[in-house]
Image: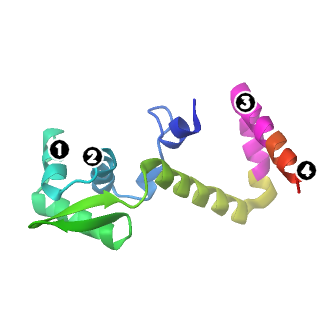
């Protein structure tokens, strides 16, 4: 599995983006990440086609709030706005993951590291990746 595959989440390992976005905002972001640049009407149509009962005005409000929060950009194109994500999905997941790791380490320090290593030991592939990352870090430190 590549780092892009891990960053984009999977059915077995949820992405963690539900902590950053509410359920509707996450559905909107999924459409924008997939189809950008995109207008409100297109996102609304996709959501309705997928069985979501949602008003056009609700989608527009969500998208405007995502602009205010710095998650989307918008540009006027004729009489409508076209929206694009500020970051890719993978970049957003990396940001969320970095924040979670920082919080764990800030709150729990060595205990968090210990549990992380214990968890990695349960999966030979993860343990091999961890060892490889440590070797690479040591090599980089040796270059200084």
**Residue 130 counted in the magenta span:** yes
Cα–Cα gap, marks 2 and 1: 10 Å
Cα–Cα gap, marks 4 and 2: 44 Å
Cα–Cα gap, marks 1 and 4: 52 Å
Q: Which mark is residue 46?
A: 1
Q: Is residue 100 above or below residue 90?
A: below
| Residue 101 as seen in the image, left or right of residue 76 | right
Q: Is residue 120 above or below residue 19?
A: above
- Residue appearing at x 71%, y 65% in the figure: 106
Tell me how the rendering is colored: rainbow
Comes first in the chain, label 1 or label 3: 1
Per the picture, the main secondary structure of the magenta-coloured stretch is helix
The quarter of the rendered structure image containing the C terminus is bottom right
**Boundaries of the magenta span:** 113-133
The quarter of the rendered structure image containing the N terminus is top right
Q: Is residue 92 above or below residue 129?
A: below
Residue, far top: 124
Q: Nearer the viewer, residue 7 or 112?
A: 7
Comes first in the chain, label 3 or label 2: 2
């Amino acid at each position: 599995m590549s780092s892009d595959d891990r960053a984009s989440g999977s059915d077995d390992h949820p992405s963690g983006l539900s902590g950053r976005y509410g359920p509707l905002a996450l559905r909107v972001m999924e459409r924008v990440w997939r189809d950008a640049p995109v207008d409100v009407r297109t996102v609304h149509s996709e959501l309705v086609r997928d069985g979501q009962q949602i008003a056009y005005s609700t989608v527009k409000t969500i998208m405007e709030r995502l602009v205010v929060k710095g998650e989307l950009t918008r540009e006027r194109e004729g009489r409508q706005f076209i929206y694009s994500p500020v970051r890719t999905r993978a970049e957003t997941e990396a940001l969320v993951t970095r924040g979670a790791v920082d919080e764990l380490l800030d709150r729990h320090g060595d205990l968090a590291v210990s549990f992380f290593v214990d968890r990695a030991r349960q999966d030979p592939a993860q343990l091999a990746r961890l060892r490889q990352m440590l070797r690479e870090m040591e090599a980089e430190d040796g270059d200084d």
